[in-house]
Image (cartoon, coloured by chain):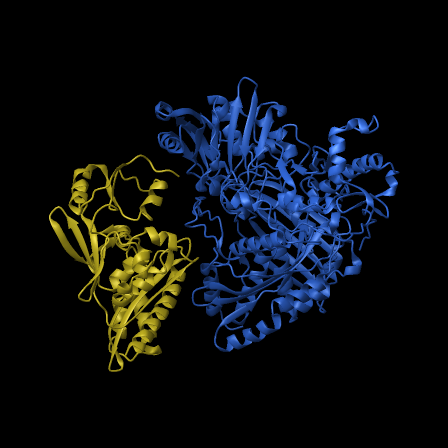
Amino acid sequence: MTIIERRDVPPARTHGPRRWVGQSIRRVEDPKFLRGRGGYIADLVRPGMLHAAVLRSPYPHARIVSIDTTAAEAMPGVYAVVTGAQAAELTDPLPDFGPDPAKHTWRCLAVDKVRYVGEGVVVVVADDRYLAEDALALIEVEYDPLPAVVDPVRALDAGAPLVHEALGANLAYDRTFDFGDVDADFAEADLVVRDRLRWHRSGGQPLETVGAIADFDPSTGQLTAHTNSLSFTSYLFMAAATLRIPANKLDIRQVPAGGSFGSKLFVTKPLVIAGMCSRIVGRPVVFLEDRVDNISNCDHHGSDRVYDVELAVMRDGTLRGLRIDTIDDYGAYIQFGVGHHGNALAQVTGPYTIGSVRYRVRAALTNKNQQGAYRGFGSEVNNWMLEQMVDKAARELRMDPVEIRRRNFIQPAQFPYFIPTGNAYDSGDYEAVLERALELGEYDRWRAEQARAREEGRYLGIGLITAQERSVFSATEFWFWFDEPGAPVTSMPESVTLNVDATGGITATLYSCAFWGNSPETMVAQLVAEEFDCEPHDVSIVYHGSQGGLPATGPGGSRTTVMLAGAVEGASAKIKAKARRAASELLEVDPDDLEWTEGGFQVRGVPDRRKSLGDIAIALHLFKHTFPEDIESGLEESKVFDHPWTTMPSADRSDLGVFYPFMGHACHVPVVEVDVATGEVRILAYAAVHDCGTLVNPRSLAGHIVGGTAQGIGTALYEEFVYDDHGQLVTSSFLDYTIPSAMEVPELRIDHVETPSPYTPHGIKGGGEGGRMMAPAALNVAVNDALAPLGVRVTELPMTPDRLRAAIRAAEGAPPG
Amino acid sequence: MKPPPFRYSAPTTVSDAVALLVEHADDDPRVLAGGQSLVPLMNFRLAQPGHLIDLRRVTGLDTLRLEDDVLVIGAMVRQSTAERSPDVALAAPLLAEALGHVAHPPIRHSGTVVGSIAHADPAAELPAVALAADAEMVATGPGGARRIPAAEFFLGPFTTALEPDEILTEVRFPPFPGGHAFVEFARTHGNFAIVGVAALVALAGGEVTRAAVAVSGMGPTPLRLTAAEEALVGRAPGAAAIEAAVDAGTAGLAPAGDLHAGAETRIDIARACLRRGIEGALARALDRR
């Protein structure tokens, strides 16, 4: 095995005692939401505001022959009717990070042809949404239907209908990466475990869909927009370019997301539609997706993969190498490229010492809504794939599923550990997590219960999995796919400004993170309180719109808390440096003789000679002449915090560098009962133990774990965007797209192990996606464990009654073996 | 997801409501009760009635009473009211049990028993209950009221024997001295069921004397499984009789598959629900003696 020299491991930090970080405090965000004062898009009414509605394509693939908007335009209450062709005159293509965007041009409305059911064709602006939808019904579009490409494997066949003629194929990306000596590991293996696995698409389901209220002021050329999808803030100049307005004339104001789960990551289409319409009519225009718009046209469907996997193992259970060949159905466009597979490559070998990986990824384009982001961003699919393979290896070796995992764990002394792809795992203690999960999940008791139930003809299964929870992405995961990327890699910074007013009150300004269901305000309040020894709920949190804002990126990849912690730490250090100097003037001592303690600076060892932050602040704000010339009035500092540990990939991409280094870990232990007569899966118990480093607010993290696990249960058992063989979307509402409710989601038993990161403030790692990164794998393992006596192994998610019954019927019909 | 324009009337008497149906016959009028099925269909523009005739202000339609042993439910009785009614629990426990499976509590607070039956969704619980219970439908039109047996009421998906100028004003549930069970299978709690089974059995002298079994989700209407009933009657309650009834009851079924269950799985699930439904009804019938 090649040993790669590692440079640039950041200096390890020591973490001191903490007062507020680690406390379960009430969330700062809660009171406004509980009082109905969150201010969602649907709550915001601007004077003179008009409403937009979009005509959706009923066809998966068709040429647009003609569009007659005469009747709609003549309807009273209608202000504008804009076709895709007209929109293309008014706006540029939408921002697109995919490979070679010119070959699959993506616009806010379809031009010339539609490529999936639900793609926007015409937008109408009217007095209200009712009238706008009435007008849509008056528009006549003549389509010339084309054969649709639905299956991602067949999409790659020669002669398949082309989604984008300019691309010349439906293969948007194809590359094979070798990490480590794959051939040697497979040549020396005692056993190669093989499987074909299928993960169907699902997606985040926000309570409020994506919306934007755009207000164009023709007198200044300024476009002010309230939208709930503000993220990748540093890239909003791209949205301005699409709208053909100067970036410094676009101000995006944050609106709480009403749930994102990834699905609002850099969504620009509603903003562009509303902005274009506002510019046309000269009045504020709101476009808020309805549920059908969102399900069919949100650009944020989740991963949709076919895997052919081989795992090289030794007879003693040692896992040696992985060969992964995956085709991912990206739908009709590919806005984030194959970044989802960067996510997978960040933790492709899981918590195990697997030494080599061959990874082939092919991105297929089909006549479906495109992929975007969904909690896990593709890493959850990798976790599922790997755990199915490890589980299958245990069965084939007749090994205990706990033992095979334990035997292959990376050990605490091995960190920082570099996996074959080049990514680093900063720290971990997987054995400790496993032990706690076995205890919390009452593993031994359930194994006994399972045996007892079998005698009664009942099928119980226990789904133990151990998997990774990467956090704090670096943009390299979007970048290393290309030999000659179009630009250097960005550090995806995040910024905070801290202002101490004349009374010592602290205001923190955030530049990107609207409330996504995460808790940026609570996190910042706790982190500020930790720095300044104040009460978290006394910290005021405000958001700065994009215009004139500091560099910011926003939520995604479980980065918010770590990045905000870095920014708060940096801004606090600047505040304290200025305050120290001011205090030294006020106390007439050397700055080095002062120490920060209990909310102020005091002379070392002399507690009665001190100045509180309030004392210092009022002097700095009001009594400038007390200080030397070079001390400016006021007490406000900002910190732009860049990604703390990114290294460059090698030129040949045999090493992708460090790009997702703060590595959490979890063990989930669900117990299920499968009703073999109906194919129903019931969850009898569920334990989850996570280690995402130092906890900031255990209560809000538990909320992440519960919510993420509920979504993972949806992915495992209920949720799928189904396109039929002709490309028709047959799950366009919650009638058919079934999501688990409180009745399906069990009470979780949750606990944590804390292995602080040596490289982040306080040792924090991100934990926003962990539940969904574990639950699909765990439930699949559990169901397979339940059905093992019948010889049934399920390799496709979601595990619907139909799929389970089909598998059971096939096993019943199969000759005994 | 907004409905197209429609007209709206809120009459106060049944005869006015019927008169409005006649008067606006050319405007595709629809009767509105709880609105839990019709209004979503309108929002999706799948139903586009020109005129809604709201029954909420019509006096006398919220009746829920026993006439001798017959339970009479008026057109505006909310599902949650019936679900909690001691009269329903006593006189039509099958209906009471089925109501707990209808959607979620907030929907049952608005939705009506009679409205659900008149809507005639082949996947819905209450039409199957009405069919198993041999309920009588009271249809009121310009010429007055007539009674339609449940067996003649359901003609197809969302299609009933009601004339365009008739309103389903009452449903009458006769008593059934025996055991009951309503069993269904849905993807998630409160969602439309894939299969539902309504079962009633009576025992005497160690054998089944009477059985009524209906199933939802297995055809264009709820279906009465007379073959299953015949397989039960005259036999001792036990596994053999139940299996015979399951086989007989599902033998002729040819459901269409859909997104949630293919035809084969639908039959698998129907077999399981039928077995559990008959078992449950028999257990209660045994308790009752």
Q: Is the residue B204 above or below the residue A411 in the image?
A: below
Q: Is residue A659 left or right of residue A780?
A: right
Say which quadrant the C terminus of chain A sits in: bottom right
User: In the image, what residue occupies the spot 34% across and 54% down?
Assistant: B108
Q: Residue furthest bottom?
A: B205
Q: Is the residue B81 above or below the residue A725 in the image?
A: below
Viewer-side residue, A272 vs A477? A272
Q: Is residue A249 left or right of residue B227?
A: right
> Residue A506's x, y, as percent?
68, 38
Viewer-side residue, A530 vs A8? A530
Quarter of the rendering containing residue A709: bottom right
Q: Residue furthest left?
A: B143
Viewer-side residue, A725 vs A605? A605
Say which quadrant the N terminus of chain A sits in: bottom right
* Total count of labels: 0
> Residue B15's x, y, as percent?
15, 45
Question: Any idea which chain is the yellow one in this picture?
Answer: B
Q: Is the residue B232 above or below the residue A720 in the image?
A: below
Quarter of the rendering containing residue A583: top right
Q: Is residue A738 left or right of residue A696?
A: left
Is residue A157 visible to us here? no
> Residue A317's x, y, as percent?
70, 67
Q: Is the residue A165 above or below the residue A603 in the image?
A: above
Q: Is residue A745 left or right of residue B221?
A: right
> Residue A282's x, y, as percent?
48, 21
Is residue A593 visible to us here? yes
Question: Any idea which chain is the blue one in this picture?
Answer: A
Q: Residue furthest top?
A: A219
